C-alpha cells in the first residue's frame, strides 16, 4: 500500500498514527479544494443537487455504522446538495446475500452513485459489475470491495494492525520475549482483516510468541467469545499475557470470557473502532487500547466523494482521491486514507471527546465515575 499524499508530499504511515483527525481540513488548507460545499463550479457539474446516493453498510454489531457513519454521511450529502440530495440506505446485517439484493435493488432504482461497505469483498464483485454496466459509479467504503469500483475511502489498515501490535509489545515490555499471546483476527471475508493481521504480525515478529490464533466469522463477538474459551482451555488463563483483538466488539467478548474463567486482572487487550463501551473499558483499565478512526472524517469525505462524483465535479473529486490502492481485481484505485490514532487512558479527552464523538457525561457514567476522576476525565 503506497504512502498517503497530503499537499503533494508523501506522509510516512507511522506519522499518520500520531496525527489528529484533520484530513478534510488539510485538503482545504492545502488550497486543493477551495469550494467544498460551495457553488464555484456549479456550471460545470454534470448533474445538479437533485441526486440519489445509495449507501450500503455491512452490519449492526459494529456500533459505529448505525450510530455515526450513516447519520454523518446523510447530513453531509444534505449539506452539499442544499437539502435536495437523497440517501437511500440499507444495512445487510452481516449477510452477503442480503447485501447483494440491496445492491441490485439500488441499481434497478437507478441511483446516481453507490457507496458500499462490503460484507464479503469478493462476493460483491458481480454486483459492482452490474452497476458499472448501468453506468452507476461505485465507491468502496471502509473495506476494499472487488470488481470495477471507482474509488475507495478508508484508513491505512495495515497501520491499524501495527498500532495494535505495537501497543501489546510496549505493554509487555521486557517480558515480551517470554510471553504468549492470543490473536483474535476479524472475518477472513473482509479484506481489511488481512491488512490488520499483517500489520500486527510485523510488530510481533521475533518479539512475542503467538500461542493461539483464530479468525472470526462475520466479526461476531459470540464467535470470538467461544474461541477465547478454547484458547483459555488450551493455553491456560495465567499463561495468556495479552490478546490481540482486531476490533472492540470482539474485545468485549474476549474480556468477558476471561472474567468467566476467573480472571481478576485482565491482561492487555487491543481493539478498534472506539465504541463507547470500549472507551469505558479503556477508562476502567479492562481494555488496554482501541484504535480511533475518525468516523466524522471518513464518512464526511465519503459523502463528498460521492456527491462530487455524481455531479461531475472532477476537480473536487480528484482532490479527495490523491492516493491509490490495489485490489485483487483492479490496480491503482483512486483513494483517500484517513489517519488513525491509538486511544488509551491518556488521550481520551484529546480524541473522541475533542471530536465530539462522545461527551464526558456519556463516558463517565456512575459505574466509571471513579476511574474517570483518576485520569482527570471530568
Image: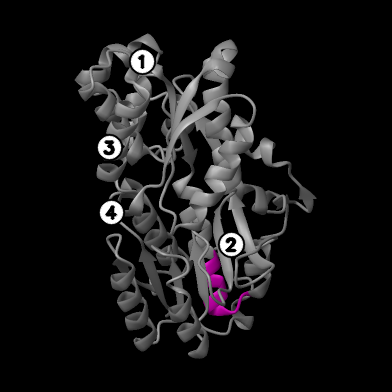
**215 w.r.t. 153: above or below:** above
Q: Tell me if residue 11 comes above or below residue 36 in the rendering.
A: above
Instruction: Tell me, for residue 225, which label it has, or none.
Output: 3
Tell me whether the residue at label 4 lies in contact with that at label 2, contact meaning CB atoms closer than 8 angstroms. Answer: no
CA–CA distance in space, label 3 to label 2 = 44 Å
Residue assigned mark 4: 60
Q: Nearer the viewer, mark 3 or mark 2?
A: 3
Secondary element under disc 4, as helix, strand or loop, is loop
Q: Is residue 310 magenta?
A: yes
Question: Dot 2: what SS?
Answer: loop
In the rendered view, does 346 fall on the left or right side of 87?
right
Q: Residue at x 26, y 16 (%)?
A: 369
Magenta stretch prevailing secondary structure: helix
Frontmost of labels 3 and 4 is 3
Residue 332 in view here: yes
Against 352, residue 262 (above or below) is above
Q: Quadrant of residue 36?
A: bottom right
Q: Position of residue 326 (x, y in %)?
A: 65, 64
- Magenta-drawn segment: 305-313
User: Where the C terminus falls, by quadrant?
Assistant: top left
Colour theme: one colour
Which mark is first along the chain, 1 or 2?
Answer: 2
Q: Which residue is mark 2?
A: 36
Q: Residue at 68% x, 42% y: name it.
A: 13
Amino acid at each position: 500500500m503506497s504512502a498517503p499524499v497530503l499537499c503533494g508530499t508523501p506522509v510516512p504511515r507511522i506519522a499518520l498514527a500520531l496525527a489528529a483527525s484533520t484530513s478534510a481540513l488539510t485538503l482545504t488548507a492545502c488550497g486543493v479544494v477551495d469550494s467544498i460545499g460551495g457553488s464555484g463550479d456549479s456550471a460545470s457539474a454534470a448533474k445538479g443537487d437533485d441526486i440519489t446516493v445509495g449507501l450500503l453498510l455491512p452490519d449492526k454489531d459494529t456500533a459505529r455504522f448505525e450510530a455515526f457513519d450513516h447519520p454523518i454521511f446523510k447530513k453531509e450529502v444534505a449539506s452539499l446538495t442544499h437539502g435536495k440530495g437523497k440517501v437511500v440506505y440499507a444495512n445487510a446485517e452481516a449477510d452477503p446475500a442480503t447485501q447483494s439484493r440491496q445492491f441490485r435493488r439500488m441499481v434497478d432504482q437507478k441511483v446516481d452513485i453507490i457507496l458500499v461497505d462490503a460484507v464479503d469483498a469478493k462476493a460483491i464483485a458481480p454486483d459492482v459489475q452490474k452497476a458499472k454496466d448501468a453506468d452507476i459509479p461505485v465507491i468502496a467504503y471502509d473495506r476494499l470491495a472487488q470488481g470495477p469500483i471507482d474509488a475507495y475511502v478508508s484508513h491505512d489498515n495495515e497501520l491499524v494492525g501495527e498500532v495494535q501490535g505495537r501497543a501489546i509489545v510496549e505493554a509487555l515490555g521486557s517480558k515480551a520475549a517470554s510471553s504468549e499471546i492470543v490473536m483474535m483476527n476479524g472475518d477472513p471475508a473482509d479484506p481489511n482483516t488481512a491488512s490488520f493481521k499483517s500489520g500486527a504480525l510485523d510488530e510481533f515478529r521475533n518479539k512475542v510468541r503467538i500461542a493461539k490464533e483464530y479468525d472470526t466469522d462475520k466479526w461476531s463477538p459470540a464467535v470470538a467469545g467461544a474461541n477465547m474459551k478454547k484458547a483459555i482451555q488450551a493455553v491456560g488463563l495465567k499463561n495468556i499475557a495479552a490478546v490481540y483483538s482486531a476490533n472492540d466488539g470482539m474485545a468485549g467478548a474476549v474480556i468477558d470470557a476471561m472474567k468467566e474463567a476467573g480472571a481478576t486482572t485482565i491482561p492487555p487487550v487491543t481493539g478498534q473502532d472506539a465504541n463507547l463501551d470500549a472507551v469505558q473499558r479503556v477508562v476502567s483499565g479492562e481494555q488496554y487500547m482501541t484504535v480511533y478512526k475518525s468516523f466524522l472524517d471518513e464518512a464526511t469525505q465519503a459523502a463528498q466523494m460521492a456527491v462530487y462524483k455524481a455531479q461531475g465535479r472532477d476537480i473536487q473529486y480528484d482532490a479527495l482521491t490523491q492516493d491509490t490502492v490495489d485490489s485483487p481485481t483492479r490496480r491503482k484505485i483512486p483513494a483517500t486514507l484517513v489517519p488513525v490514532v491509538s486511544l488509551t487512558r491518556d488521550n481520551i479527552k484529546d480524541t473522541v471527546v475533542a471530536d465530539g464523538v462522545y461527551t464526558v457525561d456519556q463516558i463517565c457514567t456512575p459505574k466509571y465515575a471513579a476511574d474517570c476522576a483518576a485520569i482527570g476525565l471530568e
